[in-house]
Image (cartoon, rainbow, N blue to C red):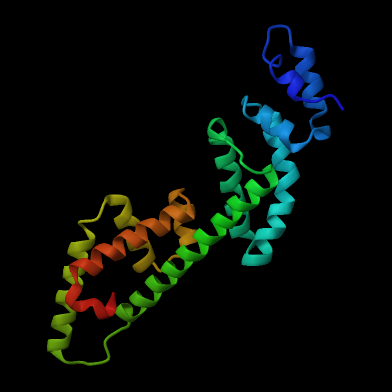
Amino acid sequence: MISLLFFVSLYYQPGSARLKAYIIGNLHTYDDADLVALLLTGDRAAYECIYNKYWPLLYAYVYNRLKSKEVTEELIQEVFFSLWNRRAELRLQQTLSAYLYTAVKYQIFNYIKADKVRKTYASSFARYNEPLQDNSSEEHVAFADLTNALEKEVSRLPEKCQQVFRMSRNEHRSIHDIANALNISHKTVENHLTKALKHLRLAFREYFWFL
């Protein structure tokens, strides 16, 4: 096999159309080191070759751990999105395979950590949203005051953070639904909820039991 590294320096030279066509047509025959070398030049075909080769392998790895088709696809997309957008910074100290598996492990870790935050958030506000069973007027007044104070603090959050918080607490929408409705990532939704909860915990230290 002719090494792709031999061609990289010639790839973008004038009159190299036939050479480009040859390389693209034979990418599947090259090893990972050659594909990475071409990826560093910004070659989309090399990227797609890496994508097609590793997508099913990474999918099986992530799905076996998270058991969610939707989450698995999102995490793997994030890895490949980063690989392409940060290709100029890519300095592999290991094989491409090891690099990609390390990247998805990091994504899995972050997802699990964020999921724990989400569950803690949901549990905290479930108690807050429970209807009062006591008909005492004082209880209702106190609850109304607390609700008004909460709304006031929420209004101090950045606009997008407010929107995400209200969709979650008032409309009881899932992180997935919010992400789709606002066209943002799951991670961004989780970050907004974490920020909102942190702000409210600080503002209502004396009522920490429900936050």
Point out residue 82 in the picture as x, y percentages from the top left corner. Answer: 55, 41
Q: Is residue 119 left or right of residue 87?
A: left
Q: Is residue 26 left or right of residue 184?
A: right
Indicate whether 26 appears above or below 68: above
Q: Quadrant of the C terminus?
A: bottom left
Q: Quick one: which residue is furthest to the top in this view?
A: 15
Point out residue 161 in the picture as x, y percentages from the top left corner. Answer: 32, 55
Q: Quadrant of the N terminus?
A: top right
Indicate whether 6 appears above or below 13: below
Name the residue nearer the viewer: 47 or 118. 47
| Observer able to see residue 95 | yes
Name the residue nearer the viewer: 20 or 38. 38
Q: Residue at x 76, y 20 (%)?
A: 6
Point out residue 183 in the picture as x, y percentages from the top left corner. Answer: 46, 48
Indicate whether 100 appears above or below 25: below
Q: Quick one: which residue is furthest to the right in this view?
A: 1
Point out residue 60 in the picture as x, y percentages from the top left corner. Answer: 72, 59
Q: Residue at x 61, y 41 (%)?
A: 93
Q: Residue at x 59, y 57 (%)?
A: 105
Total labels: the figure holds: 0
Q: Residue at x 83, y 28 (%)?
A: 26
Q: Is residue 71 left or right of residue 117?
A: right
